[in-house]
Image (cartoon, grey):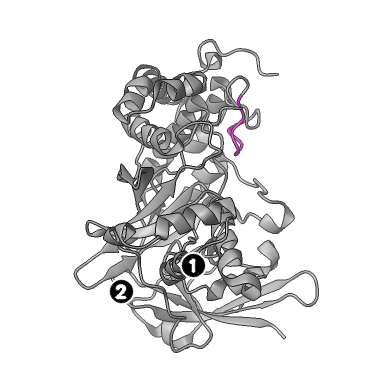
Amino acid sequence: MAEVAYVFVYLPGQVEPTVAGRFERDSHTPPAVGRFVYGESYLRNPSAVPIDPVVLPLREQLFTTTLNSGFFGVIRDAIPDDWGRHVATKLYGGEFQQPFDYLWLPSGDRIGALAFGRTHEQPIAERSLLRWEDLESIPYLEAIQKLDRNVPLTPAEEEAAIVFGAGTSAGGARPKFTVHRDGAVWLAKLNRDSDRFNQVRVEATMLDLAAACGIRVPEHHVVRVHGQDILLIKRFDRIVTAAGITRQRMVSAGTVFLANEAAASYSYTGSYPRFARELSRWTVTGDEDRRQLFRRMAFNALTSSTDDHERNHALVAEGIHFQLAPAFDLVPQLGNTQKRYLALVIGHYGAIAVRENLLSSADSFQLSRAEANQHIDEVQWTVRTHWHAKATDWDVCASDVQRIAGCFDPPSFEANPPIV
């Protein structure tokens, strides 16, 4: 028998979800097949928007997929990544074993605007959103840290983690949680004992540096609680209004690429040039988004931010239309500083991060070679002249500054060496 879930969506400007359709997945006979159909009432709703305008356009049709073990990309995006799954296993044991089970997590912090229900009447109940001021009075941070270290929780810590939800759908395996603070919703990211540098302060540095390069980034702050550094990143898929919290539709680049994560941990079926071309189908702001994406590609190459896989790029619909989401998860990778490769393909020479490879894909961004060179030159000059000052602004310690110094402005961008 197929697994069934009703899909709800928070329409633009609405704080209550509307049932959009029915999703079922049949995995008994390989390959697993996913099916989705919009509800008749939703199709008649003048405010209705497609949950995926390319793969699931708003029309009366039975849609099917065998990608991602039968999960449409936009639904896969709403399922927790490594950290959320780790937490679910620790808190609930065997209750969440299969990917479909994660649709029933009582989580209000899924990325994007989808929710899921066992019936068409309402989605599953969501946890309360953690308030920032509660961090001082409940053992929530202690619970997060113990979950990360696989240390047993006290009853009070376990209760706090279950009541407020210690997992998140946001990508990656690092500890994080969602919190309400100062009239906004924030993603809070923590350091780990095993980190080779203060990741919180270095990531804040990278976000500031990217902004100086003309790249859109979310609002962010570093705060200390109980002696711990916490990076707060404003959720760009959430807006707090007088009526409540509205949710913006969001899809990962993996969804745009029709990536099949069932084939590999990350299939990397996409590339920066392909993403740039797809913007014409997904957005009405394609020209500006393509320029943003090219500068982001150059920035990642010039800062050794090589964890730029297809779930670390996204589109967000701040209303009816999608546009390129602000840059996020920008962290230099210490082991990729000499001969650098980005996670996504850059140009004609694969993923190698050298100037000539970036220039080889200029056409896909609707840039001339001279315009592409100018973008690279501007990003390079800003990275070269400002990275150290930005690190100082965020109080990155001297040993960490020395440790990450080799990640910036590689020699390969100076003279266009032969690509081998």
380 in relation to 76, above or below: above
Q: Secondary structure at mark 1?
A: helix
The amino acid pointed to by label 2 is Val
Circle 1: residue type:
Glu
Which quadrant of the figure has residue 114?
Answer: bottom left
Neighbourhood count class around disc 2 (C-alpha, 10 Å): few under 14, some 14–19, many 20 upward = some
Kindly identify the residue that appears in the image at 36 percent across and 26 percent down. Answer: 391
Residue 110 placement (x, y as % from top left):
46, 64
Q: Which residue is mark 2?
A: 15
Q: x and y percent of residue 24 in the render?
A: 63, 79
Q: Can the viewer see residue 73?
A: no
Q: CA distance from mark 2 to mark 1?
A: 29 Å
Mark closer to the chain start, 2 or 1: 2
Q: Which residues are magenta?
A: 340-347
**Front-lying residue, 88 or 117:** 88
Residue 186, horizontal then vertical, whole percent: 34, 55
- Please name whichever residue, 78 or 191, is drawn nearer the observer in this view of the structure: 191
Which label belongs to residue 158?
A: 1
In this rendered view, identify the residue nearer to me: 397 or 259.
Answer: 397
Q: Residues within 10 Å of mark 1 (few under 14, many from 20)?
A: many
Indicate left or right for 401 with 36 as reference.
left
